[in-house]
Amino acid sequence: MQIILATSNKGKVKEIRSLFEEDEVIPFSEILGPMEIEENGSTFAENALIKARTIFGKLGRDDVIVISDDSGITVPALNGEPGIYSARYAGKGATDRDNLNRLVEELRKKGLKEAPAFYTAAIAIVAPGAEYVVHGWMYGRVIDTPRGEGGFGYDPMFIPEGFDQTLGELDPAVKKELSHRSKALALAKPIIEMLKARSVR
Ligand code: ITT
């Protein structure tokens, strides 16, 4: 069975591929072309399911497993912002850099040089007659002076618990070990194995 990724985010594709080395993982755009999916859910789980169901429906095949990732960063000192709105924090069509700059600005407005924060990833898995959602989290803090070019999104301003450097500065192996996405994917793996086993006749 092919695993199709219901994401257009290149950073996610890279990280998910590095965690599924033994499987063929294909971004949906390689099959269906580029597509905008309206994420109008009120939780990470709802939005992950919206994306996976949409791509599963468009593919119209019963020999695929579709997985999606809905994720974001939450800063309790900013009333939980940007949370599920992480991808559009600086407005519709905002780049990763625009969103990061907005978060820096919001911290500075409150006079915060740093603040506790955490990443959430909801991974939805959709296959014929099957739907699952699993979650993972990574805790740490955000700082108002981004550092480093590694990772993507908010990584240059996020320092994981137990470290002094941002995810923009740390070796990618650290993020691979600790991330919200890695933790959720570790829970997704046995579900995917079961779906593969189920399809072998
Ligand atoms: P898809 O919906 O196509 O998957 P997207 O980028 O729109 O791509 P989301 O709606 O899930 O994805 O938004 C996730 C936001 O949270 C986006 O702004 C990311 O940059 C940020 N984000 C998620 N995981 C991250 C990570 O591991 N490191 C840095 N930023 C992350």
Image (cartoon, rainbow, N blue to C red):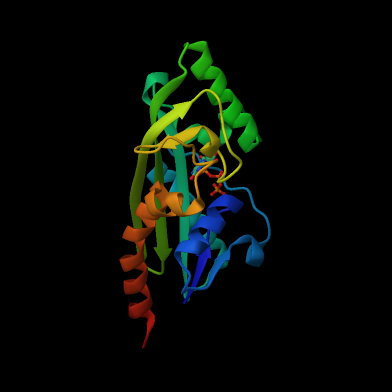
Question: What is the quadrant of residue 145 in the picture?
Answer: top right
Identify the residue at image location x=48%, y=70%. Answer: 21
Residue 165 place in picture, x, y as percent: 47, 37
Q: Which quarter of the image is occupied by the C terminus?
A: bottom left
**Vertically, is 181 above or below 30?**
above
For image coordinates 39% across by 30% down, the residue present is 117
Q: Nearer the viewer, residue 129 or 164?
A: 164
Q: Eyeballing the image, is 36 above or below 84?
A: below
At x 49%, y 59%, the residue is: 16
Name which quarter of the figure residue 188 lies in: bottom left
Towards the viewer: 79 or 199: 79
Left or right placement of residue 117 versus residue 33 in this view: left
For residue 194, which quarter of the picture? bottom left
Place of residue 132 in the rendered image (x, y in percent of width and height, measured from the top left): 34, 58
Question: Residue 41 placed where, x, y %?
Answer: 44, 39
Camera-nearest residue between 19 and 93: 19
> Extreme front residue here?
164
Residue at the bottom extreme?
A: 201
The residue at the point 53 percent across, 36 percent down is 154
Horizontal placement of 156 versus 133: left or right? right
